[in-house]
Amino acid sequence: MRGALRNLTYFLIMAALIVLVGQMQSWNLALSILNLCIISAIMALGVNIQWGYAGLFNVGVMGFAALGGVAAMLISMPPVVEAWSAGGTGVALGSLTLIVTIAAAVFTFRSLAQGKLRMLALIIVIAVGYSVTRSIFDPATDAIERVNPAATGYLGGLGLPVLLSWPIGGLFAGGAAWIVGKITLGLRTDYLAIATLGISEIIVAGLKNEDWLTRGVKNVVAIPRPVPYEINLQRSEWFINWCAKLGVEPVTFSSIFVKLCYASLFTVVLLIVLYLSEKALRSPWGRMMRAIRDNEVSASAMGKNVKARHLQVFILGSMVIGVAGAMLTTLDGQLTPASYQPLRFTFLIWVMVIVGGSGNNWGAVLGGFVIWYFWIQAEPLGIWLMEQITTNMDAGSALRAHLIDSAQHMRLMTMGLILLLALRFSPRGLIPERTGHG
């Protein structure tokens, strides 16, 4: 009972901090922080499924989040008819050739006995297939990228409701996780971390450079929303009348209303993911995963297929991350491949899991809120702190100007300080994993 009260207190404190931002700064900012905290909590849940349940050290979080973002763009953006006419057929044929090449390579590998002949045959199949694929693919993508490159220069999407992209983003990330897992999941923990980070960088680099698919660094903007647009609300009679009854200004309140709509949708997804995660953790499957995490040798001796279970949990965690990635792109309203920085933001997600409590789903959610809140607020708090420290200095002091200008770098120092304090005073996290020993 005491633990439950403590956990509730943590969440009430976080709610109070967000309300404080609304009172002291603005409700628009407070709701923006809330929405990003919810998305961060979902990402932290995905990492917690992999690390907290199974001990898989995935440092490729941003790669799977980026695939979710691509899904949001591909599902919701309208197709660019001129681009499809210019190179759509070539891209389809090139993709088919690539699939045939992979199938031929697998068939060759399985059909021939190990030796020089198999290696030679594989090299020939891959070289020929690659050459044919590039000869079809390159002219098609060049033609697509030449179609009004300032505004389009890519194929576009399917023009479907953006909410469909959230589960599709999970499927994209899960499919990639299956491929990555097949390659990396037998590696030692440190090698797994290096491999997943490298693959994440490859995914992000591909998104930055394949303009025909994602517009690369030119970005895809104006992704359709699942909620109303502010300008439409401001022109709606029912909304204007509602604002008059509440005594609020329609322009300002329209932005708050939109953010509340996003928060409602995101909260529903968070609660669904949290509920399913808790059910899985408390099930025989969850107990089996923790047994494998704690002692792989013993679990294997008891007849458990460790690698298959690791692949399973790796896919599930990546799917959750992919859903969160699609939600993030939906909230931003744009796909910006250059903003996916695997090492920097993967570090943040991991800090969320560690500070919140590895192996505890509620801890992962709390960590998502705590870390993202202080990531956003560290800069204004840092500026305020430096202003107080330098208040007695001369207004033209170079040292004063330097200290205030350096406040924006308080973020990383704040994250490091929070992590150090958590590891010193609560090494198992704010809400530790529950075990049979208490």
Image (cartoon, rainbow, N blue to C red):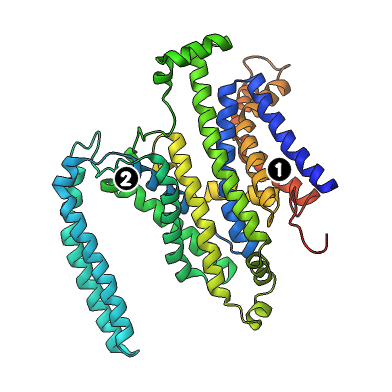
The earlier-in-sequence mark between 1 and 2 is 2
Query: Residue 359's x, y, as percent?
Result: 68, 57
For the point 42% across and 66% down, the residue is: 179
Q: Is residue 81 left or right of residue 159?
A: left
Residue bearing the label numbered 2: 214
- Crowdedness near tag 2: few (<14), some (14–19) or many (≥20) residues, C-alpha within 10 Å: many
- Crowdedness near tag 1: few (<14), some (14–19) or many (≥20) residues, C-alpha within 10 Å: few
Placement of 249 over or under 374, stated as above or below:
above
Query: Residue 211's x, y, as percent?
Result: 28, 46
Residue 124, by quadrant, is bottom left
Q: Nearer the viewer, residue 282 or 214?
A: 282
Residue bearing the label numbered 1: 417
Q: Nearer the viewer, residue 12 or 87?
A: 12
Whether residue 91 is visible here, answered yes or no, is yes
Q: Nearer the viewer, residue 158 or 284?
A: 284
Placement of 20 over or under 236, stated as above or below:
below
Front of the two marks 1 and 2: 2
Placement of 139 over or under 110, stated as above or below:
above
Query: Three-letter amino acid code at disc 2?
Result: Thr
Q: Nearer the viewer, residue 15 or 418?
A: 15
Residue 224, by quadrant, is top left
Residue 373, by quadrant, is top right
User: Which secondary structure, mark 2?
Assistant: helix
